[in-house]
Image (cartoon, helix red, strand yellow):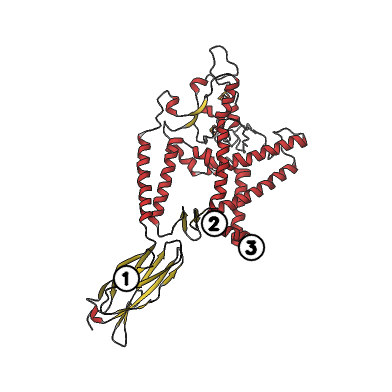
Amino acid sequence: MSDGVPESNDQESPEAPPERVLTTLNQDGSRRWIRPRSVVGRYRRWRRRLAMVLMVVFVGVPWVKVGGEPLFLFDVLHRQFTFFGQTFLPKDTLLLALFLLGSFLSWFLLTATLGRAWCGWGCPQNVYLDFMFRPLDRGMEQLSKRFFGRKLTAPLPVVLQILRVAIYAVLCLVLANSFLAWFVGWDALMAWMSSSPADQPAAFGVVAVVSAAMMFDFLYFREQMCHLACPYGRIQSALLDPDTMIVAYDSARGEPRGKAKAAGQRGDCLDCGACHRSCPMGIDIRDGLQMECVTCASCVDACARVMERAKRPPGLVRYSSQAELEGKPWRLVRPRLFLYIAVISAVWGALGFMLVSRSSADVVALRAQNVPYTRLDSGLISTRARVKIENRSEEPRSYSIEIPDLAAGQLVAPTEPITIPAGGLENTTIFVELPASAFTKGELPIGIRVFDGVDFDETIDFRLLGPWGAR
Ligand code: SF4
Ligand code: SF4
């Protein structure tokens, strides 16, 4: 390939295993570089259009704000997550659990229905690799041919290799920043960029590490990310069933394969290898359903052109299902999907209800630590409680505290409203003075009212501690 490695560097060795273990490994264990042929066809056109939209989404979404809040922000540093302008804090465990469960189940439904459509059509790994880096490699090969007279499959001249690595570095730096923006936000990222590395060593370290990881991935690791590292690729076999949509070769029609079709003796496959050569995962779809296949449909387009030229009907390699290939009816709608849809609807419904009914603040009253009450010189009891107030709204709010129906005493602190920033959490201690006779068996049930004068007004039950007897 353009990084100095030929299209296929298969090597035989006396110790070679009887069959290939990975498409990216030669039989002697060395790397087999995959250099897929570029294809044209309707699926390729649709994938290109979708890839352009997705690249804008991947880079642009962190810029989008809803009501002053990011549309999406996975703020791991501050342990808060924002989805569609709704911020989830660490204590929103149930909401987060429902969100993650709903997301995973929806993903499972997509896989059970459309197979690895996400991998081939939507995953950033394949979007960037297929529509940014591989076209760049092909451009380098064209330059090599035009200005250095080399074959397209020959190693690049050193000057073009250096240029290629430099362009990869710039692109990976941009992609690393746009990736990090999902986790820290563009505002923080712009602040990092506009300051000196000496002022923000940790931030620059993170950008450097992520950029280097992307360089490693796109320059070297490539399709092995799908083969070896991605957990989704690993679990997909458990999610597929005979009716799941896959890319498949119709062996009943294609076999016996052969270059020329002697009358009535051969199937439609011309054994031209176009499907295999176009595969970015390096597999031959004619070997059947394989874990490495990401359903990108490059082989479908490649074979369709071969069939067109040979004046045979298209669809020898096509989107299909195992059931359809075996001559059974293809059931797109089946009980398993209904089960997924029912559970997913319940999970998203519960999450939606909890979000809609969620109040703009959360208040918790707790016992004071250490000495719960003291006796004042005046003979009154000074007792206290801790109150935690979390402002879940998108703006600063001022919260007042009252104890209604406190007939025999008074709240002495706090008397002023407590201002808490958007998303902030404040701990305060309330002090109440009252006579010892107000307590029964050392306790006095009260209600602590917290309100912001906007839309939050809640009274929580609490038991103040005091002396056991009346004196
Ligand atoms: S076999 Fe076909 S659909 Fe599967 S990854 Fe290769 S080219 Fe894409
Ligand atoms: S591209 Fe079509 S005809 Fe050519 S080898 Fe593949 S399946 Fe056979």
Tell me, yes or no, if residue 55 can be seen here. yes
* Residue identifier under label 3: 195
Q: CA distance from mark 1 to mark 3?
A: 47 Å
* 62, above or below 224, in the image: below
Q: Is residue 331 left or right of residue 180?
A: left
Disc marking residue 448 = 1
Q: Is residue 303 above or below residue 139?
A: above
Figure quadrant of the N terminus = top right
Name the amino acid type tagged 1: Ile
The 10 Å Cα crowd at callout 1, few under 14, some 14 to 19, many 20 or more, is: many
Q: How many marks?
A: 3
Q: Quadrant of residue 334?
A: top left
Q: Amino acid at mark 2?
A: Gly
Q: In the figure, is residue 235 to the left or right of 48?
A: left
Going 60% across and 40% down the picture, which residue do you hit?
131
Question: Looking at the figure, which quarter contains the C terminus?
Answer: bottom left
Position in image of residue 85 (x %, y %)? 46, 55
Question: In this view of the protein, which residue sits in the foreground, 399 or 89?
Answer: 399
> Which amino acid lies under the numbered mark 3 shown in the image of this protein?
Ser
For numbered disc 3, what is the local secondary structure? loop
Q: Earlier in the sequence, mark 1 or mark 3?
A: 3
Q: Identify the mark at residue 185; answer none if there is no mark.
A: 2
Between 454 and 11, the one lying in front of the other is 454
Q: Residue at x 43, y 59 (%)?
A: 90
Dot 3 surroundings within 10 Å: few (below 14), some, or many (20 or more)? Answer: few
